[in-house]
Image: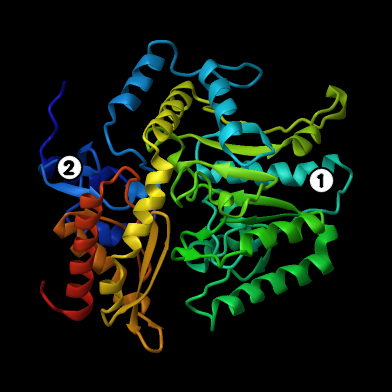
Amino acid sequence: MNSTPNYSELASKNKQYLWHPFTQMKDYCENDPLIIERGEGVKLFDVNGKAYYDGFSSVWLNVHGHCVPELNQAITEQLERIAHSTLLGMANVPAIQLAEKLVKITPNGLNKVFYSDCGATGVEIALKMAFQYWQNKGSSGKTRFITMNQAYHGDTIGAVSVGAIPLYHKVYKPLLFSPYTIPYPNTYREESAGAALEQTLQALEALLQEKSSEIAAIIIEPIVQGASGMIVMPEGCLKRIAELAAAHQVLFIADEVATGFGRTGKMFACEHEDVTPDIMIVAKGITAGYLPLAATLTTDEIYEGFYANYEEQKTFFHGHSYTGNPLGCAVALASLDLFESRGLVEKVATDATWLEQQWPSFLERKHVGDIRQKGLMIGIELVLDKQDRTPYHWNDRIGVKVSQRSKELGLLTRPLGNVIVFIPPLSSTRDELLEMIQILYQAIVEVTEGIEI
């Protein structure tokens, strides 16, 4: 095995050759980069040997921790058989087995699985599938989509089109199709949860009553809207949205890329309100952070809209080179086995209840405006003025500074503007969770109040 190059050499080559995602490289290149060498459990280790808690699950991916023997073994055993074979007109063993497993664990009625390699491509598939479904059915006027304010669904052109975070999306506007946008119920920024809920539902119902004949589908992040700052839906909202869509013959697409695989205390967020979407996208935690894989699941009714004689040209003309990759499917199967054997979803639900009891001390601090949580998805919103809920200015970089201080103290996370994200691996013990939130607390107090702890 080749030895790891020294830090200075790697840092120099990193700045010379790499362009990092969602990163202003001018700022990045002015600082010493963090370079990870290995992972163990819920910790990551840099090339200098310093350990860090993985407080955002390596961008919301990690489930069981790093370097898990059972997952390593699953990949090794599959690698000895075959690394990849196409699903275009063929099949492979793990892809079939995983599809069966996904159908069994997702909401009832999602009976067909279409693979891709990440959340954005899974969303792209869902949009094209919904659009073509209506074309195949003869409803050629149903070409528009509904999204929600501050939504994020990925970075491909279709996914960006149904995104609604101006910072990320406005520069690409000339390339995009235009969806209808309705409010996402933000109970911190509205007068009450009831008011936020009614605003969303009234806007959706009015839009559907007027425009349903031209709308193919609505796409939402169920229960928790992630990139907007971990905004949690009021109870009953998801169910009512699904009912309104069905009543107006509009397909309902659930983007469970971030919320799926136990993250919210259910295997999938839709389960909190017994909702079966017409199309559901899963990714991120599907392979426990090991390999790129995603799946778009749909109902028999939608599948049958494409099931026709060859001459009718109703085929879904879409596919990716690594669709249904056997290595990814094999490790996903092993991960789901661990979910079952370790009772992981139930563990998340109980850990989440315990974790809720830790937040009062945070909320006593003068710049902690709100803490939003569902399962092990947590957003801590920092505000300049707590009474008036006045946000910090973007140029204050308050989230960046808190995350930087957390890194110095041994915890990695990434802010969403003024919201500090805490999304630990689901396998984290309570002692580990406690150490992580103590670091967060210290970083928040030191940065926002200038008090050393």
Q: Position of residue 242 (x, y in %)?
A: 70, 56
Disc 1 element = helix
Q: Is residue 66 above or below residue 361?
A: above
The numbered dot on residue 176 is none
Q: Position of residue 338 (x, y in %)?
A: 39, 31
Q: Is residue 81 above or below residue 310?
A: above
Q: Which of the marked residues, 1 or 2, is nearer the chain's N terminus?
A: 2
Asked if marks 1 and 2 touch (Cβ < 8 Å), the reply is no
Q: Quadrant of the C terminus?
A: bottom left
Left or right: residue 420 compared with residue 16? right
Q: Quadrant of the N terminus?
A: top left
Query: For residue 133, which quarter of the picture?
Result: top right
The numbered dot on residue 134 is 1
Residue positioned 13% across, 78% down in the render: 451
Q: Residues within 10 Å of mark 1 (few under 14, many from 20)?
A: many
Query: For residue 347, which quarter of the picture?
Result: top left
Q: Position of residue 352 (x, y in %)?
A: 37, 56
Left or right: residue 342 compared with residue 150? left
Q: Which residue bears the numbered disc 2?
A: 45
Most extreme residue toward the top is 81
Name the amino acid type tagged 1: Trp
Residue positioned 55% across, 34% down in the render: 116
Most extreme residue toward the right is 138
Q: CA distance from mark 1 to mark 2?
A: 50 Å
Q: Position of residue 381 (x, y in %)?
A: 37, 72
Disc 2 element = strand
Query: For residue 249, which quarter of the picture?
Result: bottom right
Name the amino acid type tagged 2: Phe
Q: Is residue 441 above or below residue 36?
A: below
